[in-house]
Image (cartoon, helix red, strand yellow):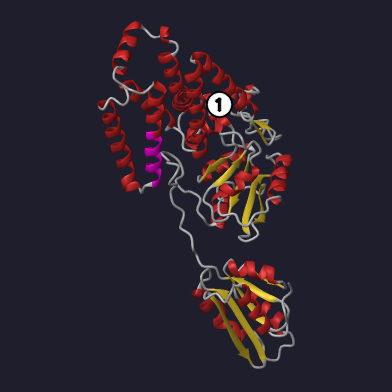
C-alpha cells in the first residue's frame, strides 16, 4: 500500500493499523505554511534521542521558502544528524516494519514519501558470560539478544573481508531478521545456496528463537541426535567458520546455529584448543568412553543379571543375589524407576534458580537413593549403576544431544530386557547403522571415522598439536590448506 500525500490520512491509516495503541505517538509541526509530522512507537524508541537529536532542530532544517521541503529536510537531516540508518520509503509495509523496529517516521504534507531515522531504544542485556556453557579457560563473552552485537562479536574476531553476512526476513508477523554467516572462500557454495533456499521456503507466523529455524532445516527428523550445534559462544562460532561451516544467527536469540553438526563435534569443546594437547587427548578419550558407557551400561547390567549370569564371577553373583533378596520389583523396573527419578531431579535442577537448584538435586539424590535402598524398593547395586550412567552423561551440555542419549539408553534397556546379550548386540548394531545413515548438507554424521579421512582422523579422538593441523576437513571446504609449511 502506497503512502498518501495527506499527513492526516497517513496518520489515520497508521493509527488504525496499530489499533490506536497507546504507545503510538505522533506530533504535528507547522513551519510557516508547511506542515510536518512525526510518528514513533514509544515502547521501542528512545524519547531522549527523538527530543535531543531530532525534534530540537527539525524546525530550523526546513527553509520557509523552499520549493521542495521534503528533499530539503532529507538533505539537511543527512548533513546534521550523524545516523547511518536514515532513508526514505513510499509504502506502508516498510513503514510498519521500521516503526516496530524503533524508527521515527517523518511525514511532509503534499509528499508521498516518508523519512525514517533510527531512534531505537536499548532493550537488551549487555555482553555477559554464557549461562549454559561454562568457560574455564578462554573468552568469556557470549551472544545476546541484540543482533548487531552478535555480528560484531564475530566480526571483531575474524577481521577478513571474506566474512560475509546475508540477511533474510522470516515470519509473516514477526519479520525476524535471520543472518547466514560464512567465509566465502572457505565454505562450500552449494551448502550456502541450499541453506538460503531452505530458509526462503519457511512460511510461518513468527520466529522467536533459533530453535524455530532448526526444525525447518533438519533433514532427518526421525534422528534423536541433533544435526546442528546451538551455542552462545562466539569463539566456537568463529572456529567453525574458519573450518568451512555455516552459521545462522536469529534476531532476539542468543543462540547461534552451526551447520553441519557432526557426532564428533558434540564430543569436543572450544576450550580443547586453548590447553596442552597431551592433557586434552586424555579428556577426549574419557568423553568418548563416557558416551558409550552412558548409553550401554543399564542394558549391560540387565543382560548379565537376568539372562547371562554365567559371565559373572560366583562371589559377585552371590553378593548381587543377597542385595536383590527382598526387592519386590524386577531389575528392569528398578533401573527405570531410578533413572526416571534422576532425570526428574535433573530437569528440576535446570529449571530452578541457581541459588536453590544445586541443593535440590544433591539433597534429592542422596535422600531418595538412601531411602529407596532402606525401604527395599531397589538394591544398592542399581543405585551405583544409575549413578555411574548419569554421571557419564553429565559431560555433555547440548540439550538435544542429551535427549538423544536418553532415547538410545531406553532402547538398549528394552532390547536387553527381552533378549539379554543378544538383544544388547542387536541394539548396538541398530545404533551404529542408524547414526551412520544420518546425512546433512551431503556430510555423513560419523565423519571422519566413517567414511575415513586419515589426515584429520587423529584430531577427532585425541588432540593433535596445532602445528600439525595443516589441512581443513575436505567434506566442509575445497580450500583445504589451513596453514603454511614451517621453514
**Residue 238 horizontal side relative to residue 94, left or right:** left
Q: Of helix, strand and loop, which one carries label 1?
A: helix
Q: Residues within 10 Å of mark 1 (few under 14, many from 20)?
A: some
Question: Residue visible at 63% across and 53% down?
Answer: 178
- The residue nearer to you, when weighing 15 against 380, is 380
Q: Quadrant of the C terminus?
A: top right
Residue 90's x, y, as percent?
A: 72, 73
At 68% from the left and 76% from the top, the residue drawn is 114
Per the image, is 342 magenta? yes
Q: Is residue 398 magenta?
A: no
Above or below residue 358? Residue 102 is below
Q: Is residue 228 left or right of residue 480?
A: left
Q: Predominant secondary structure in magenta?
A: helix
Q: Tell me if residue 464 can be seen.
A: yes
> Is any atom of residue 76 visible in this view?
no
Residue drawn at point x = 31 percent, y = 26 percent: 377
Q: Residue at point 56% right, 43% down?
A: 237
Q: Mark 1 = which residue?
A: 459
Image quarter hosting the N terminus:
bottom right
In the displayed structure, would residue 304 be above or below residue 358? above
Indicate whether 258 appears above or below 276: below
Q: Position of residue 316 (x, y in %)?
A: 33, 10
> What is the magenta range?
341-351
- Residue 335 locus on image (x, y percent): 39, 26
Amino acid at each position: 500500500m502506497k503512502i498518501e500525500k495527506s499527513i492526516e490520512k497517513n496518520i489515520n491509516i497508521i493509527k488504525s493499523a496499530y489499533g490506536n495503541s497507546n504507545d503510538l505517538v505522533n506530533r504535528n509541526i507547522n513551519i510557516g505554511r508547511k506542515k510536518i509530522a512525526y510518528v514513533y512507537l514509544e515502547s521501542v524508541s528512545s524519547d531522549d534521542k527523538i527530543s535531543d537529536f531530532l525534534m530540537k532542530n527539525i524546525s530550523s532544517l526546513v527553509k520557509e521558502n523552499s520549493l521542495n521541503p521534503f528533499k530539503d529536510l532529507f538533505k539537511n537531516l543527512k548533513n546534521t544528524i550523524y545516523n547511518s540508518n536514515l532513508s526514505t520509503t513510499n509504502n506502508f509495509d516498510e513503514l510498519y516494519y521500521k516503526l516496530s523496529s524503533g524508527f521515527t517516521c517523518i511525514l511532509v504534507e503534499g509528499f508521498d514519501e516518508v523519512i525514517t531515522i533510527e531512534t531505537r531504544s536499548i532493550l537488551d542485556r549487555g555482553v555477559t558470560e554464557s549461562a549454559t556453557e561454562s568457560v574455564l579457560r578462554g573468552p568469556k563473552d557470549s551472544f545476546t539478544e541484540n543482533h548487531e552485537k552478535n555480528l560484531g562479536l564475530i566480526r571483531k574476531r575474524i577481521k577478513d573481508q571474506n566474512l560475509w553476512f546475508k540477511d533474510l526476513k522470516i515470519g509473516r508477523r514477526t519479520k525476524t531478521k535471520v543472518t547466514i554467516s560464512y567465509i566465502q572462500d572457505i565454505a562450500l557454495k552449494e551448502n550456502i545456496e541450499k541453506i538460503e533456499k531452505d530458509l526462503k521456503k519457511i512460511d510461518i507466523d513468527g520466529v522467536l528463537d533459533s530453535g524455530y529455524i532448526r526444525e525447518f532445516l533438519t533433514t532427518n527428523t526421525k534422528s534423536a541426535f541433533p544435526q546442528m550445534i546451538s551455542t552462545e559462544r562466539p569463539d566456537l562460532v568463529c572456529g567453525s567458520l574458519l573450518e568451512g561451516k555455516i552459521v545462522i544467527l536469529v534476531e532476539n536469540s542468543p543462540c547461534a546455529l552451526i551447520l553441519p553438526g557432526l557426532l564428533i563435534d558434540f564430543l569436543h569443546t572450544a576450550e580443547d584448543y586453548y590447553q596442552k594437547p597431551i592433557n586434552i587427548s586424555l579428556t577426549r578419550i574419557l568423553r568418548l568412553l563416557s558416551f558409550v558407557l552412558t548409553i550401554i551400561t543399564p542394558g549391560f547390567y540387565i543382560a548379565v543379571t537376568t539372562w547371562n549370569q554365567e559371565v559373572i564371577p560366583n562371589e559377585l553373583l552371590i553378593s548381587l543375589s543377597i542385595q536383590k533378596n527382598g526387592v519386590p520389583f524386577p531389575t528392569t523396573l528398578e533401573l527405570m524407576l531410578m533413572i526416571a527419578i534422576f532425570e526428574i531431579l535433573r530437569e528440576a535442577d535446570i529449571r530452578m534458580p541457581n541459588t536453590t537448584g544445586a541443593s535440590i538435586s544433591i539433597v534429592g539424590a542422596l535422600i531418595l537413593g538412601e531411602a529407596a535402598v532402606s525401604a527395599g524398593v531397589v538394591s544398592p547395586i542399581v543405585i551405583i549403576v544409575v549413578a555411574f550412567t548419569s554421571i557419564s552423561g553429565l559431560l555433555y551440555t547440548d540439550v538435544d544431544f542429551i535427549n538423544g542419549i536418553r532415547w538410545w539408553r531406553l532402547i538398549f534397556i528394552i532390547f536387553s530386557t527381552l533378549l539379554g546379550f543378544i538383544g544388547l548386540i542387536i541394539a548396538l548394531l541398530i545404533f551404529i547403522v542408524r547414526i551412520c545413515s544420518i546425512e546433512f548438507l551431503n556430510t555423513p554424521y560419523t565423519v571422519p571415522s566413517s567414511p575415513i579421512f586419515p589426515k584429520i582422523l587423529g584430531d577427532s579422538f585425541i588432540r593433535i598439536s596445532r602445528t600439525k593441523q595443516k589441512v581443513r576437513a575436505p567434506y566442509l571446504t575445497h580450500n583445504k590448506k589451513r596453514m603454511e609449511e614451517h621453514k
